Image (cartoon, rainbow, N blue to C red):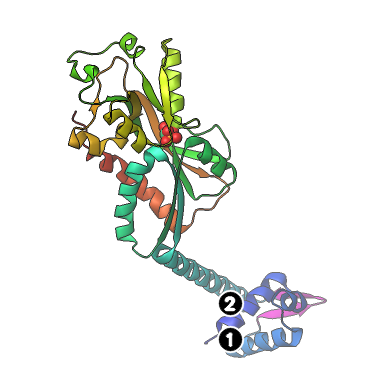
């Protein structure tokens, strides 16, 4: 017996619907074409597969067996096709992610390692602030979003995968950098701060910290990215609160100092956020598990000695 896939597919439809007419309609074939294929199949089995009693068709015992075989064959073919599609996507798929600008530093490091494993994929990375990320989540625009505190939304799934300590930085010549003992919050209230733009998660957390501790937050400038802020602090324009994750180069070069201040760091967290309504592509799924496994390890390498 050597049935073709086409014969099995037609038989599966007839056996499921117990009707040549309905099967022909489902498969966009003529009824004689369906009957012909069933006849050819029956010639191979040398046993009838269907019998007609009154107006109704029934599967014979041989028909039941061939039906089971046909269903298995069809589902195996589907599995193979899906696996091949997934493998293709892992080779040449498109990873579409958005990250909070502060997360950019470690995400790029992880992307570089991921890209080595899948060198032919295309990556779109939007680096933006918290309020823009919230809009992108609302519009379901990205596969995955990496951000600080995600919104309470039953349509979103968020996984906390890394801590994000916010620290106070100063130029090495700043008087507070020379202090060897812990600095009080009261002292901080007398300093000028350069802050991130409105909508930044770092800014929201910093403002909340000062409000919760009931001390004035003396902000003189705002800038839309961490790099500009770090540069301004190096130039002695004031102090700033930034994520420790953004400071690798400056701490290594000793061009900035992390101050030892009471109640610091402010502990924020990094979350991986996805929409429950969106089916992740194989490459996005792969990046998600890579990130969850590797993030902590990547951050261990960060130089944090001050
Ligand atoms: P930000 O995000 O880059 O918008 O400040 C960081 C965060 O949400 O903690």
Q: Which residue is mark 2?
A: 66
Image quarter for ligand 1 equals top left
Image: 25 above or below 122: below
Q: Which circle marks residue 2 in the picture?
A: none
Which secondary structure dominates the residues rendered in magenta?
Answer: strand
Residue, x 47% and y 70% (percent of image)? 80
Question: Given contact means CB atoms under 8 Å apart, are the residues at marks 2 and 1 in contact?
Answer: yes
**What kind of element bears circle 1?**
helix
Which corner quadrant of the image does residue 276 belong to? top right
Observer-nearest residue: 147 or 190?
190
Left or right: residue 188 versus residue 145 is left
Left or right: residue 80 versus residue 235 is right
Q: Which residue is mark 1?
A: 45
Observer-nearest residue: 213 or 238?
238
Left or right: residue 283 versus residue 29 is left
Where is residue 119? Give x, y as percent. Answer: 33, 63
Image: 272 above or below 204: below
Where is residue 149? Give x, y as percent. Answer: 46, 31
Question: Which region of the structure is painted magenta?
Answer: 49-58
> Is 284 colored magenta in this rendering?
no
Say whether residue 209 is visible: yes
**What kind of element bears circle 2?**
helix
Say whether residue 148 is visible: no
Which corner quadrant of the image does residue 51 belong to? bottom right
């Amino acid at each position: 017996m050597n049935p073709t896939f086409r014969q099995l597919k037609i038989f599966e439809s007839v056996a499921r619907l117990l009707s040549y007419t309905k099967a022909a309609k489902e498969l966009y074939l003529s009824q004689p074409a369906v009957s012909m294929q069933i006849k050819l199949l029956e010639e191979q089995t040398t046993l009838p597969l269907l019998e007609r009693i009154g107006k109704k068709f029934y599967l014979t015992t041989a028909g039941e067996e061939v039906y089971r075989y046909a269903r298995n064959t069809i589902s195996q073919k589907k599995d193979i096709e899906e696996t091949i599609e997934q493998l293709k996507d892992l080779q040449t798929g498109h990873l579409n992610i958005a990250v909070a600008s502060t997360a950019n530093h470690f995400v790029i490091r992880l992307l570089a390692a991921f890209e080595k494993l899948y060198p032919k994929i295309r990556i779109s990375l939007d680096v933006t602030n918290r309020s823009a990320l919230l809009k992108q989540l609302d519009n379901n625009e990205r596969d995955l979003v990496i951000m600080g505190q995600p919104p309470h939304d039953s349509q979103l799934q968020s996984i906390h995968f890394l801590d994000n300590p916010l620290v106070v930085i100063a130029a090495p010549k700043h008087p507070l950098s020379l202090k060897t003992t812990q600095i009080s919050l009261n002292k901080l209230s007398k300093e000028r701060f350069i802050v991130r733009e409105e909508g930044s998660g770092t800014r929201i957390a910093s403002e909340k910290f000062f409000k919760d501790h009931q001390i004035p937050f003396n902000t003189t400038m705002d800038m839309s990215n961490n790099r500009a802020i770090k540069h301004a602090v190096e130039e002695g324009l004031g102090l700033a609160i930034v994520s420790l994750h953004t400071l690798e180069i400056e701490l290594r070069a000793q061009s900035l100092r992390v101050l030892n201040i009471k109640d610091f760091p402010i502990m924020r967290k990094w979350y991986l956020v996805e929409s429950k309504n969106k089916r992740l592509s194989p490459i996005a799924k792969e990046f998600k598990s890579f990130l969850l496994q590797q993030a902590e390890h990547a951050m261990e390498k960060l130089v944090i000695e001050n």
